[in-house]
Image (cartoon, rainbow, N blue to C red):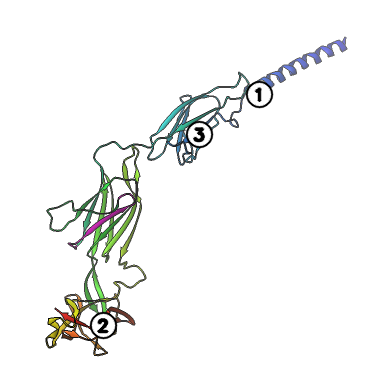
Amino acid sequence: MRTFRQWVTISIVLIILGAACGRTADSETAVCNFTEQTAVTVHIQNENGEPQRLVNVRYQLDDGPWQALPEVVNERVVLRDGPGTYRIRLEKPGYTAEEIAVVVAEAAEGSCQVAEETVTLPMALAVCPNSEPAQLDIEIVSASEDVVVTAVSPQSGRQPLTCAQPDAESCAHFSLPLNNIGSYRLNVDGLAGLGPMLIANETISYTLRTSQITLRQANLAHSLTVTGANSLDATFNILPDEIGCPLADFRSLTTQVEPDINGDDPYPKLAIAQQNNLTMTDLGNEACQAAPEPYPVVYEATLPVGTPLNEVGVFTLQDGDWQEANCALADGRFLCTVIFPNPFIGQPYAYKVVAAGEEYVGTSLPFDNLCLIFE
């Protein structure tokens, strides 16, 4: 009797354990893991059927929240969120946003396998509407009245800009039509950089003037402040905005000024220029038959900042020897005078400036068969 009861008890336990194991197996089978399976593959192309790069992707599954992929996508999107309805949106600056809906089903009910969907989606360049052309406004605040602005682009070449204030005595506003996408270079010349020359502690210095250039397009603006510069080159990109219209990218802007007072090179550069008019003619010219008379010829020397005054000399070649000029600072200019015979006949003509061990030859004409007439 005890043996029969023991068998009954064991049978009941086995039945209970079998039922529990069955439930565990069924519940494990019911949980599907889709993360290792590709649900949707989207091949991204441009208008020419070529792979499209640097695309921003967002997607939505079964009316859930929009999710953004953490990085831009090159050529192909792969999503692995299991079966359902995917709404995928592709965006890239300068291109029309594209959106597509893809339905992904299970391969078979209860199989935990998805039926992968593969689609190709081309992205078209955004087209700017035919309205008023985009304009870049250029405002210049400088003590100079002779500012010249020139734009250079690969498509349009070199383009001098006209003043946007035709009735103004000195122009402060210019306008540049932005007709093309690409790189632009803007040259602003004639700024009032170096002011009058000064002598402090027997050393050359200058009054430095500050100019401000403001670039503005619609509600975007970027201002540049330069000190001591006579010219500025600004390079920047024109990119398409969200609807394809040209838009100045001021983040890409780089500048170069001349002279650069913060650079290692001396500024301004050592130079010399004759101030009198000079006519060169042959010895038979009637004006060359007159008896030579003493005539003051004036030269202006440009000297780098920090040049010791006692190390500056301006020289002209007369009768085979270098003759030192009489120099002085006058109204912020370093002017030097030499007395020449006028007309100057049958001699080489040369002049130069020497400063702090550096030498700059302004003119050297080794012709002894010419007649020079100073005016």
Task: Tell whether 27 sits left or right of 44.
Answer: right
- Which residue in the protein does label 2 denote? 367
Badge 3 element: strand
**Point 60% across, 32% down: residue:** 36
Residue type for callout 2? Phe
Residue type for callout 3? His
Instruction: Mark yes or no: residue 316 visible.
Output: no
Front tag of 2 and 1: 2
Query: Do residues under tags 2 and 1 come within 8 Å of each other at their CB atoms?
Result: no
Nearest to N terminus: mark 3 or mark 1: 1
Nearest to N terminus: mark 2 or mark 1: 1
Nearest to N terminus: mark 2 or mark 3: 3
- Which residue in the protein does label 3 denote? 43
* Residues at marks 2 and 1, CA–CA distance in whole angstroms: 106 Å
Task: State the image quarter where residue 361 is shown.
Answer: bottom left
Instruction: Mark yes or no: residue 306 visible.
Output: yes
Mark 1 burial class by Cα count in 10 Å: few <14, some 14-19, many 20+: few
Task: State the image quarter where residue 205 is shown.
Answer: bottom left
Front tag of 3 and 1: 3
Mark 2 burial class by Cα count in 10 Å: few <14, some 14-19, many 20+: few
Residue 351 image point, x, y percent: 25, 82
Badge 1 element: helix
Residue 296 image point, x, y percent: 15, 83
Badge 2 element: loop
Residue type for callout 1? Glu
- Which residue in the protein does label 1 denote? 28
* Residues at marks 2 and 3, CA–CA distance in whole angstroms: 76 Å
* Residues at marks 3 and 1, CA–CA distance in whole angstroms: 35 Å
Magenta range is: 143-156
